[in-house]
Amino acid sequence: MSEQNASQIPQSINEPNKHPERSRRKRSRRELLKTHFGFDSFRPNQEEIIESVLAGEHTLAIMPTGGGKSLCFQLPALALEGTAIVISPLIALMKDQVDALNANGIMASYYNSSQPSEAQEEVLNNLMIGQLQLLYVAPESLWNLTNYFQKTEISLIAVDEAHCISAWGHDFRPAYTQLSRLQDEFPQTPIIALTATADRATQDDIMKQLRIENGKRFVSSFDRPNLYMEVRPGQQRIQQVLQFLKDKENQSGIIYCLSRKSTEKVAEKLVAKGYKAKAYHAGIEAEERSRIQEDFVNDRIPIIVATIAFGMGIDKSNVRWVIHYNMPKNIEGYYQEIGRSGRDGLPAHGLMFYSFADVVQLRKFATGTATEAFQLAKLERMQQFAEALSCRRKALLNYFGEHVIQDCGNCDICKMPPKYFDGTVIAQKICSAVARLQEQEAMGMVIDVLRGSQNAQIFEKGYQNIKTFAAAKEIPWKDLQQYVIQLLNQGVLEVWFHEKGRLVLTPTAKQILFEGKKVRLADLTQPEAVALTKEKTPKKRKDLFEKLRTLRTKLAQEAGVPAYVVFSDASLEDME
Ligand code: ADP
Ligand code: MG
């Protein structure tokens, strides 16, 4: 050990005494954690986020569902003088959190428009006499209370489920947009925004809209290594589900369906086979819904067949599996839903069925909405994920801005990989085209440029003069498109949905371009590479694949989906 290193040791041992003030505060935080919440230690990032808030910094906390976001504002609310305002989108969520806080002896209430006026008055009284450590408010009610807030001390403002503020998020709420006014009303108060589901662009947008760009951002790892991910073609789903459930006796699980009707149909079929299953959707009476929820949480009903209305705010650690009976509409929703299993860290299984019919259905839902183009783009990305030919976890984590390059070994693709070849040169060409186009163009144009297409737009923009023009003219258009999608799924490229779907390079792309990093691509000449026709015999698979090749364009045109779609055999069954 060198002199220098040795001399550093006593220094670090002395560290706590050098800042007695700070260490006393630290100890008291641990004490708060223990006495008020009953926990012995912080979860990853909780302590850092809490420190940031206590230091008066605006803070954005991105943490997976179940990661412990609430504590990140609840504990500072106890450590600071005054009342913390917590903005939360769902009355049910507010009530659960307030009940839990009260049970721990913490002075917390909620305020929303559905309360009787006496209850509202009581809450405001408590606020005025300084008897509230936390006040949960619906975003719609917030601005009715500003007079009261001006007369009290506000310790911090927490914006829970902050993705709702961004039209680029997956669950936009108009009332959240008003939150950009928070800075005017409370210029001195630290704001903490929290969410589990925001891709990188949405994170930026949240900070911009809340005007906390200068704040600190903490992104926890989204990896849930115990969660096995699998995607299967969606033919004969009910049989597949029954098969799946065979060795899962008494395990808790959730089946997500697209429609209320199908939740009931699927539940019925399971009950007929002797399973204890219940349907759950927003059309069921509230009382019955909370009974079902309680029965599930307390292991009296192991299987819930639900629309996505089920699960938000449910705290159950031993859910062993989640099935998506249909493909979800975007990756945020998918991740959030599979993330409800395996919170105890034990092995869990996320199984998704995917078919062309699902895509058609989901496109219908999105069509005509205010954010149609955006939703369709996210749906397309979901579909690309479903058709991934490389590690699913890598695709998922990169989607949320974690640049993971290792394959996980715990997904269907890792277990049964397609045939790969060294695709480094192709990847370099694609990345270099994206770079030369200044990361301003979407997939279609990038491919046109690589193919050397002679279309009007190319000449208008002068792209025939850039260096990568026609650099991959020998590769068929749709194959090139598949390679671009593979690079998206490998976290080499990213789609900026809110900016016309332009393609952007990630740090991995830069390694490929400048540091000689190698890339594997799935071999598209092998029908097996499509990995979607797994359970058929090789002969049938090959026939189907050929049939698909010819049908592909026609079907895509009819349904108005992008032509790159590589249909599964399930799609054929759905369409025929
Ligand atoms: P999120 O809002 O991120 O989905 P929650 O705040 O609801 O997560 O917390 C999920 C669960 O984790 C809750 O049961 C909570 O009590 C528990 N939890 C939070 N922090 C800790 C901790 N430091 N130690 C143990 N359990 C924790
Ligand atoms: Mg939460």
Image (spheres, rainbow, N blue to C red):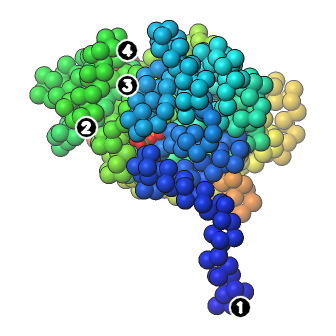
Which residue is label 2 attached to?
252
Residue at the image position 76 percent from the left and 38 percent from the top: 213
Which residue is label 1 attached to?
3
Inter-mark Cα distance, 2 to 1 = 58 Å
- The reply to whether dot 2 and dot 4 touch (C-beta < 8 Å) is no
Q: Position of residue 337 (x, y in %)?
A: 42, 34
Q: Earlier in the sequence, mark 2 or mark 4?
A: 2
Label 2: state its secondary structure: strand
Which residue is label 3 attached to?
310
Inter-mark Cα distance, 1 to 4 = 68 Å
Inter-mark Cα distance, 2 to 3 = 14 Å
Q: Amino acid at mark 4?
A: Ala
Residue at the image position 66 percent from the left and 54 percent from the top: 508
Residue at the image position 77 percent from the left and 42 percent from the top: 214
Mark 4 crowdedness (10 Å alpha carbons): few <14, some 14-19, many ≥20 = few
Q: Position of residue 445 (x, y in %)?
A: 73, 32
